[in-house]
Amino acid sequence: MPKSLKISLLAVSVALVLCVFVGVNAHGVRAASEDSQQGAYNQINVYGEVLQHIQSDYVEVPNIPQVTNGALRGLLESLDADSSYLTPADYKAYKEDKGGKAQVGLNVSKRYGYATIVSVVPGSPADKANLSDGDIIEAIGNLDTRDLSLAVIRLLLEGAPGTDLQIAVIRPRKAEPEKIMLKRVIVSEPPVSETLYEDASILYLKPMDIDREHVQEVESKLKAMNKAGNKKILLDLRDVAGGEMPEAIRLANFFIGSGTITTLEGQKFPKQTFSAEPSKAINTTAPMAVLVNRGTSGPAEVVAAAIQDDKRGQLVGEKTFGEGSLQKTFDLPDGSAVILSIAKYASPSGKQFDSDAVTPGTIVASNQDALDEGSDDDTSTSNGAATPKKAAPAPDDQLTKALDLLKAKTA
């Protein structure tokens, strides 16, 4: 096949992806404005010229399919971490994945081009290896995460129970990536943790996920609190990155009796406003504080922002991770696919989580930095891979501050 024809076909494949953004598809969806279309097609011409220079002038004969895949992946990831391009092979594996596989206890997203740890499941292999939110996964096995879509990264972290997973991790203040070997296990989220403080006047609740089961547990404990006479609530959403948006709305509604909890809107996605229902509220008057940190993501951010914007309670801790969007998958003719964010969640005050995250009113730094500084000495796993020693737990300044704020409030 002539080079010019190959280049033309590759340019057409990029055009198919760009059509998603300008609103043109085979099902007759209304086209975007003529100016937007013209701008997109001008870029296709530029892409074709760049591809031609690579094909004819690069220092060696390039792998054009690999170049094109990289361009498409970069195109999607320039939008947000959750938008991805999947090659035909990637998309086949993605569709065949039924979930329920063994994991290592990591919730991940993409930041700075690489896979980034959002949170770690307590007691999981990742937790025992002293991995923490903010650590960057440079590679999974021999695959650079910079060259992988988020959907594929999440698939690679899963596997059969008992199988090994090697990752290269970049930690704060460490110049070189550390190779760590983890064993995949069936990871189960711990139940909601409950503790009573200040002569049982403060009820502390810690869900590790915002799913139906954990939200149901919180509901039961709040109802029991009303009967037991506890007067104040401390909700700990630190390192809570998993869950479902409908459950987040339900959880926030336990504390808020009226008003907006969150909104969802996109370019072609009509704005939806999710409001609190008085009949679903459980306790809307008890003094309340909420703990958040950089591992608070997605559904947990919806809960935290709703409580803060409603002035229902005080947020204590660090700025959250910043993630909250709705995705749709578009099949492409060659068997590949585009996963595209089509709408984004926002707080009642209108701040999109992807862009602004949630900043607590009372900032308290995490003690994790101190733990990281104390973990320079390494031990070796059975296969020789280095894992850091876990330092003794540092005082929880964020928890202490939240308790102090609640103690000063009159029930």
Image (cartoon, rainbow, N blue to C red):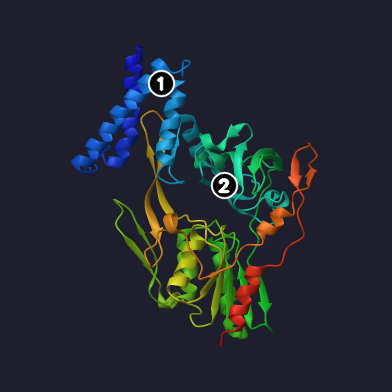
**Mark 2 neighbour density, 10 Å: few (under 14) some (14–19) many (20 or more):** many
Q: Is residue 270 left or right of residue 158?
A: left
The percent coordinates of residue 346 (x first, y second) are: 40, 61
Cα gap from disc 2 to disc 1, whole angstroms: 31 Å
Note whether residue 224 is visible: no
Which residue appears farthest toward the top when viewing the image?
Answer: 2
Tell me which amino acid carries mark 2.
Thr
Quadrant, the N terminus: top left
Report if the CB atoms under discs 2 and 1 are less than 8 Å apart. Answer: no
Name which residue lies at 50% across and 83% down.
Answer: 285
Name which residue lies at 56% across and 84% down.
Answer: 409
Note whether residue 151 is visible: yes
Name which residue lies at 71% across and 67% down.
Answer: 395
Tell me which amino acid carries mark 1.
Ile
Query: Residue 175 falls in which quadrant of the image?
Result: top right
Of the numbered discs in the image, which one, if any, rests on residue 54? 1
The percent coordinates of residue 369 (x first, y second) are: 66, 57
Against 394, residue 54 (above or below) is above
User: In terms of sequence position, does the residue under pointer 2 or pointer 1 come before the other?
Assistant: 1
Quadrant, the C terminus: bottom right
Q: Is residue 26 left or right of residue 384?
A: left
Q: Nearer the viewer, residue 186 or 255?
A: 255
* Residue tagged 2: 116
